[in-house]
Image: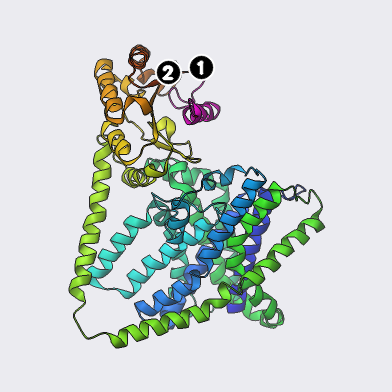
Amino acid sequence: MSIALDGIRGGAALVVLVGHAVQQELYTGPFGFDTSLQHNAVIVFFVLSGLVIANSAWCRPSSLPHYAIARFARVAPLVPVAIGLGLVAWAIGQIGQIDVIEQSRAYTTPSVAAVVLPAFFLSETSFGVGPLWNPPYWSLAVEVWFYVLFGAAFYLRGWRRMAVLAFAAAVAGITVLLLLPIWLLGVALARFGPGKTLPADTGFIAILSGLATILLSVKFETTLNMLMFSALNTTPAELGFAQLAASDFVFGLGVALCFLGMKPLVQSRAALLERFHPQISWLAECSFTLYLIHWPLLTLARGYGLSAGDNLLLFAAGLALIVALAGQVAKLTEHRRPQVRRWLADRWAARSASRQPQPVASPLRRLLRWGGIGVLGVYVFAGWLVAPTPLEPTVSPRTVGTLAQAPLASRIVIGDSRLTGIPSGQGVLFAGYPGATIGDMTRMARTLCLLSDAEIVIALGTNDAKPDMRRPAASLANLRRMVAACGPERVWVSEVWPAEQAKMPTGPDFDAATIAALNRGIRQLTAHGVGRLIPQPVLADHTSDGVHFNEATALRYGRILRTYGAT
């Protein structure tokens, strides 16, 4: 069975490579799949990872230190290579002025955070920043948090377990927590599946059921994820790589059923698998490296015009070169795992032997207690900054992320739900809060101005035109205070782009006269030096529901707020 699982691991990495190469337009011939192909391969890997890690924990009695050493030795050699290659590729790309595809745009801004946060697996947290030119790194960062949460749950007991789980969950954030159930499918499989070999016909039924479940996840992908967005009252942009978590879980359930049913099939083909064992093992032992180095290489190839066009043989040869390179790089990464593990184990043993017996519970308890209180305090403070904006589950984590990124930004845009689908990047940070009025964001604006010397763009006022908020004089007074707190010389104030009152369902809720009064006041304030004006353009049929912009207008809105007046 282990050979088959190795084959699946290596095969998943190859699928990701092929899918990303097509996505980067290095092959333009017939293909038949969209970008969900490589994403689904990652889901297969998550289920497989949960199965392997949990099976190891149950079948090889160990301790938390030994578990941590094993997991750290698995990923640590990969980190400098993945981050470093992205940096080198980015530098080469700057020389050739290479443009990247849309999926890489959030990974193009150089900063200390783009190195430090990924190095500590914090790139997918609410305050995270991804590594330069290496979007696939997201799954490694997420998986490390799976290791942390599983290790705490499996090896700790009592209050320590609860404290560490709460602390780790708070730091890991919503992306990790939404994807965790997929990884736990593998854990459940390890707990209840491996000891049993199903009869061949039952295994066949399990595989068919798994394939049917996978097809259902694809067919109802939009419906499942829209239900998730509605339940969390959030948008896809706020969930990052977890925006498909609902359908991904159903897909993962299908994968788990296939794993459960494949054992009798594998046993009947054991001789064939043994024949290809060396090749399967070689690919599996460089799969993680392949996964983490291929995107920067593909981006450079695309940028310098190294496309195979519709020549399938040339395309396959190019991919084979990348796989061969991964096999060589793996000698410095995955193949070093035993040495790294032994070195860490020796250091731990030496440290344990030199220590005098002493009670460790009290210092640990204090650390966890105050650490937990500190994290809770930060999240409460973040919620207070934007209150009384509706405090949905993602508001405090997003606010913490905004505060963490503010010192690195060159421009910060503060707004309402019209901003939530606009990605930050290239030095511009978008902070959008559904339902926010000008008054709601006053504390947040003051705090951001204390943390950063960036330009501030205020894009608020739409919600001040709701039936219970129509007090333009009070809204303009709050705006004046906001600008004064930040300093008028670095504040831009956008006119309020109007709602379409005739368009249902939300257009009638926003009063055109109030918006007009706000815009008159904004023009008067900026004319007297209270900030600088960003005028609204001519608009027509610009919303999808009366207030939220359609896709074309949202892109235009983001472009204007990002670049207007920028030097």
Foreground of the two, 23 or 212: 23
Residue type at tag 2: Pro
Residue 207, placed above or below residue 467: below
- Say which residue appears at 40% left-offset and 41% top-offset: 234
Q: Is 560 included in the stretch rendered in magenta?
A: yes
What residue did someone put label 2 on?
Answer: 498
Asked if disc 1 and disc 2 are in contact, CB closer than 8 Å, the reply is yes
Is residue 198 among what the camera can see?
A: no
What residue did someone put label 1 on?
Answer: 539
Under circle 2, the secondary element is loop
What x and y, as percent, mark residue 467?
29, 19
Q: Which residues are magenta?
A: 539-566
- Say which residue appears at 44% left-offset and 64% top-offset: 144
What x and y, as percent, mark residue 33?
67, 50
Foreground of the two, 149 or 472: 472
Q: Residue 517 vs residue 335: left or right?
A: left
> What whole-number distance in Å separates the C-alpha atoms at marks 1 and 2?
9 Å
Residue 448, placed above or below residue 355: above
Q: Residue 14 vs residue 157: left or right?
A: right
- Say which residue appears at 40% left-offset and 23% top-offset: 506
Under circle 1, the secondary element is loop
